[in-house]
Amino acid sequence: MSELEAPAGQSESVGTVIVAVCVNLGIAVAKAVGGIISGSSAMLSEAAHSVADTVTEVMLLVSLKAGEKPADAAHPLGYSGARYVWALLAAVATFVGGGVFAVYDGIHTLTHGEEPGDPTVSYIVLAVAFVLEASSLRVAWRQVRGEADRHRVGMKRYVRWTPDTAVKAVFLEDSAALVGLTLAAGGLLGGQLTGSGVYDGAASILIGLLLVWVAWALGRSNAELLIGRSLPPALREEVRAELLAVPHVMEVIDLVTLVQGPDEVLIAAKADFRDVVSAADVERSCEEAERRLRARFPSVRRVFIDPTPPAEEG
């Protein structure tokens, strides 16, 4: 995807996360009640799933707020990186709070058995939860689909590379929630038909593994951005071409691009200018380069150009 394109706006991301928080909080309580009544480990795992989702989405809201702080003397490049710290913690919460608990509960059910109760309430809860989760996913899907279309890339590529990890988290967690609900229903049905807790325990383990995968995917994305991720090669070449189109620029000797946030990209370059031009011409060219880059790529926030002679051969 093109990190150089400005996103639709943080307010849309905040709205997407708030919808997910409200949905998951209510669903977590309903799943827990259904799990206790039915004695289903898969239902209790789904309750843990929703609790983990709620906690992570609250962290995502904190991350969005933390990233809003303007640059100051202590942090001259701003606080955009703070959102990735909180988002990484949210991924850890998903892993520990949801995945590990679900796998443990499933293994416990397989090794110790369970006393099945009336699954009727659980089926009702799962059906309602499916509708609510689908509604939340629809909000996230519309935002992701709109951004992907605007950048003229596929949804899969957009989700993989977007620096807006808050929306990515909601999209993946809601998608995983629908799969988890289907697994839980399958576990309940299998236990009801056979009287065996194996199906319920296996469903719980699969739900846990699903959550571990989501946590890994989100953790990897946030870690990449915290470490410092460059623009994709194709976009770097577009930036290089734009710099070479600036009057008096002969060569771009070195180019560094850094994604600092969902709508923040830093560009630093060493450029060789014509020897015959004046210092004033070099200054005007640097200003022209920054103007061109900001106009073409709205997410570019900082541009640093260092006039540098080419390295002598031999």
Image (cartoon, rainbow, N blue to C red):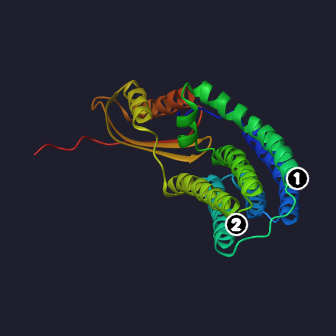
Kind of element beneath mark 1: helix
Name the one closer to the observer, 128 or 135.
128
**200 to the left or right of 152:** right
The amino acid type, in three-letter code, at marker 1 is Thr
Q: Residue 60's x, y, as percent?
A: 72, 54
Residue at the spot x=75%, y=61% of the render? Answer: 195
In the figure, residue 99 lies in which quadrant? bottom right
Residue for badge 2: 97
Nearer the camera: disc 1 or disc 2: 1
Between the C-alphas of marks 1 and 2, the distance is 27 Å
Pointers 1 and 2 in contact (C-beta within 8 Å): no
Report x, y in % for residue 100: 64, 67
Q: Amino acid at mark 2?
A: Gly
Q: Residue at x 71, y 55 (%)?
A: 63
- Looking at the image, which residue sits at the far front? 194
- Measured from the top left, where is residue 36 in percent x and y? 86, 66
Observer-nearest of 119 and 240: 119
Q: Does any portion of residue 307 appear in the rendered image?
A: yes
* Residue at 88% from the left image edge and 56% from the top image edge: 30
The tag on residue 120 is: 1
Q: Is residue 3 visible?
A: no
